Amino acid sequence: MSEPLALEVRGVSKAYGAIQALKDVDFNLRKGEIHALAGENGAGKSTLMNVVDGIVSPDSGEIRIRGEGVAITSPERAQALGIGFVHQEIALCGDVSVAENIFMAATNQRRAFFMNYRQLREKARGVLKSLGGIEPDRLVGDLTISEQQVVEIAKALTLDCSILILDEPTAALTEHESRKLFAIMARLKERGISIIYISHRMAEIFDNCDRVTVLRDGRHVSTDDIAAMTPDTVVRKMVGRELGNLYPQKNPQAADAPVLLEVEGLDDGARFRDVGFALRRGEILGVAGLMGAGRTEIALGICGLAPRAAGRVRLDGRDVTPASYAQSIANGIVYLSEDRKGSGVFLDMPIAANVSALDLDRVSTPYGFVDRSAEEAQAARLADSLRLRRGSLAAAVSTLSGGNQQKVAIAKMLSIGPKVIILDEPTRGVDVGAKVEIHRILRDLANNGTGIIVISSELPELIGLCDRAIVIHEGRIAGEVSGDGMTEDNLIRLASGLGTAPGGRHVGHG
């Protein structure tokens, strides 16, 4: 007899009022395979996995684990059945250490009165060693988003699970960190652990997975061996239409355009040192680097969102070095955080109120009251230009998909008519269709003269979208790539500290 399936989902449906999140969905997982689950935002991927993890109760259908029918009524029951789930949304306790977060479930179940913290730290250090070596004593609240994601993965790996669900696990990781994760996944597969891998990144799916299941509009579309598929085929099944090129055409004149923004000698004495570069009008400039290299900190320093650093920021030749973010906004330089839900948008506020949040004076009466009709008119204009899929502008942003939430965040920046836009991981956690639209939006803005800086851990995005890229290593610019030099090898080499030259250097021009 053949070995039973590690997991089998049969005919699962789930509705939230009039919204049918899942409709008669089938899914199966073999022992020791890595099975990709693909689909646009809102396709039903997370709902299906929440059913498997006991977070959501299905309206109908059944689940079988190793051939036995089971009722998964809670995450605790799922864990007892050997299911571990690393969620896309980070859920850690910021006020305690990394080690305590990793072993929190085990700590809650122990009966001993005293905690052996030395033993806890050493166990955590062993788990973290293969994931980048974060110190177990550090407070989680002091970690970056990407470091917190590493802790989430480490926490799941300590569970004695036979089925591991990874929901966009590399969304906050750099290329180097992602490779470490893929190596860990391969070792888990060799041990017979089955992995469900949710990702919008086709390269990751095709490099690491055995099969792929596509969901669309809450329904099962197909399940196929990766060897029999192409990325284009999977994308067509996901979106139900042809997308065209993932990246818009670059601007061949960008290299000769006048300088718009100059950063000179930016230095906070700790996280980044002597950073200098120029951004040209109509150019999309990429910023690459490993986790902790200082990419985000540099962006915050440029915008006045970090403690005052030495150095100068010039816009159109005029000194605009900001003492605060309010000054930066007034000068036309805006920043979009990598933490969309924490800092990019106000989830519980209406779409229109989010769009106007950076500068209420633009939609206020002379007496200081917000003119709701002006606010809605501004939001409608920007929403239409960004092809925002929405109902009422009075609806909360939390009702939108991830890609459309990101469009609201972009609309908020555009509301002030910025000259320079800095975006930190602008397409993290959004589906391939939304990525294409966001890339188009950024290129359209650049073609109209806006200077754009894109920080991204996704190297294909930097190469496909940006006219040029600078690479940060340990707080300094290690080099610059453009033209034919825009390759993953060059970016990784510079980000790893290989070939670093004082003041940065160029690597290839087309």
Image: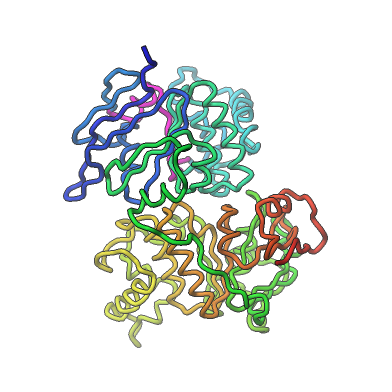
Q: Is residue 186 magenta?
A: no
Write down the region rendered in magenta: 73-92
Q: Is residue 48 above or below residue 259?
A: above
Q: Residue at x 69, y 50 (%)?
A: 489
**Residue extending farthest right:** 502
* Quadrant of the rendering where the C terminus is positioned: bottom right
* Quadrant of the rendering where the N terminus is positioned: top left
Q: Residue 79: percent from the left, percent from the top?
A: 39, 25
Number of marks in picture: 0
Q: Which residue is drawn at 72% across and 48% down?
A: 496
Judged left or right of residue 350, residue 204 is right
Q: Residue 23: percent from the left, percent from the top?
A: 22, 41
Q: Residue 123: percent from the left, percent from the top?
A: 60, 25
Q: Is residue 86 above or below residue 145?
A: above
Q: Residue at x 25, y 45 (%)?
A: 21
Judged left or right of residue 127, residue 37 is left
Q: Does the magenta stretch include residue 76?
A: yes
Decide which of 425, 254 is in the foreground and name it.
254
Decide which of 460, 301 is in the foreground and name it.
460
Q: Is residue 326 above or below residue 244?
A: below
Judged left or right of residue 446, residue 48 is left
**Residue extending farthest bottom:** 366
**Residue extending farthest top:** 1
Q: Residue 448: percent from the left, percent from the top?
A: 51, 80
Q: Answer with the quarter of the image where residue 35 lies.
A: top left
